Image: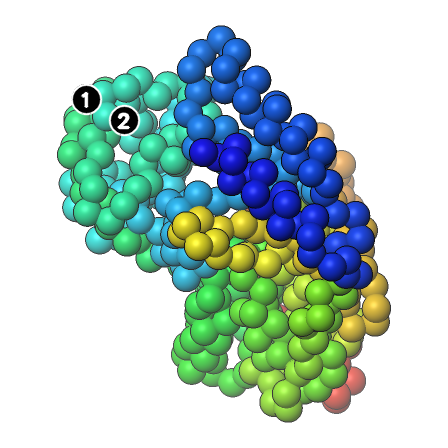
Amino acid sequence: MIVLLLLVSAVVIADEPETTASKAQLSLDDMRTFTDVFSQVRTNFVEESDDHMLLNAAIRGMLSELDPHSSYMEADAYRQMENDSQGRYSGIGVEVTTQNKQINVVFVVEGGPADKSGVVRGDIITAIDQKDVREKNLQSAIDSLRGEVGSEVEVTFKHENGEVSSFMLKRDFVKVASVFSRPVDEDYGYFQITHFTRNSADELLEQIEYMQANHEGPLKGIVLDMRNNPGGVLEPAVLIADGFLDDGLIVYTRGRAANQLEYTAKPGQWLDDIPVVVLVNRASASAAEVLAGALQDHGRALIVGERTFGKGSVQSVLSLRNGAGIRLTTSRYYTPSGRSIQAEGIQPDVEVPTIKIVENKDKRRRESDLDRHLDAESAEASVVFGSEVGADDDYMMYQALVLLKGASVLSNTDGQREVR
């Protein structure tokens, strides 16, 4: 039946008038080649194959040959993608990672199914639905834990005290925050965007307003941390750029389709005239690069860190009549100055590698350590730079604060050194 349908569609395609978008149409012989291969696999493969599975495999293969980001999503995966874009997913409410071939719980969502059952950070998942998952990869575990809302999954945990517990957990929608913030060194704000959901711009603005409302006077600067941010939904990244800009182009796209995008900023800023440092690294990608590129081109922020990943292609999510969908690359992103992000990334204004500072225990002596040294005439001394964030804690963040505080010192209008 499938072979017959394919042959009929081939005839229809061959009879259509040639257009600019379809100059290299498939011939009837091309479609016969496909159906021949389909028939050979269906008949002679060592194990019996399901026709539906074979057709889906052919679709996935066609899309995967285009580029690394185009893909086919069956109905369940398509629904899950829609939930992810809204900052929620259907699961048990844990974040996991793999270490020493074990699946470790690194975060438990408050109020989620796992939290209600007493699962805590540090627990190890050993089995899902009574199947041993140790030495399985992380993605396999995530796929097993997610599912339809209301469905149940039995998960076995090994606790830090060595005890083992199994819980029958009912999957539910779990809300996932994408923005985290805290004040740093009293006068500076730190805002981390882990990924972009439809709610990210609202989350960031809400936390900025809360920090300003609870701070005496304006903030002296902020750090926007997008390290390891893989991107996500484009629109909130554009809204955030708009929040830091008064006017001008934010990003535009170019491709074969007629409906290309172009976003411009509207008047008004969230943090007018407050210095901004954006942290990026080689894992900052897609929408994170769009935001960094826009702020860099307009001179609104100093980009600090490593050259970013370079994913400057736009994926359109297109629904299909069977409830499935495809993620198809349809255009490329360009920064306001016309730079293509694709395979190039965003080069930071200040390049700071991701390194770990190791304390030098062989410290050289100072004058004050020498016998019979002369005392200073004045005991007064000012600390030009002090911070609760040490270089050995987070070197890139430490450097961001150095730059912000340096800008604060230089912008002091009365000519006096300002020490914070």
The structure residue drawn at horizontal position 45% and vertical position 34%, both measured from the top left corner, is 1
Q: Nearer the viewer, residue 217 or 255?
A: 255
Left or right for 62, reference 350: left
Instruction: Determine whether 315 is above or below 208 in the image.
Output: above
Spot occupied by residue 390 in the image (x, y as percentages of width and height): 59, 50
Asked if the residue at tag 1 contacts the one at tag 2, i.e. Cβ–Cβ closer than 8 Å, the answer is no
The answer to whether residue 13 is above or below residue 102 is below
Q: Which residue is mark 2?
A: 128
Q: Is residue 351 above or below residue 92?
A: below
Query: For mark 1, what is the residue?
Result: 163
Instruction: Indicate the quadrant where residue 388 lies.
Output: bottom right
The percent position of residue 354, horizontal first and vertical second, equals 69, 43
Q: Nearer the viewer, residue 163 or 341?
A: 341
Kindly identify the residue that appears in the image at 61 percent across and 89 percent down: 268
In the image, what residue type sits under mark 1?
A: Glu
Q: Earlier in the sequence, mark 2 or mark 1?
A: 2
- What SS does tag 1 mark? loop
Q: As shown in the figure, which amino acid type bears the numbered disc 2?
A: Ile
As measured in the structure, the alpha-carbon distance from the residue carrying label 2 to the one carrying label 1 is 17 Å
Q: On the picture, is 419 further left or further right than 211?
A: right
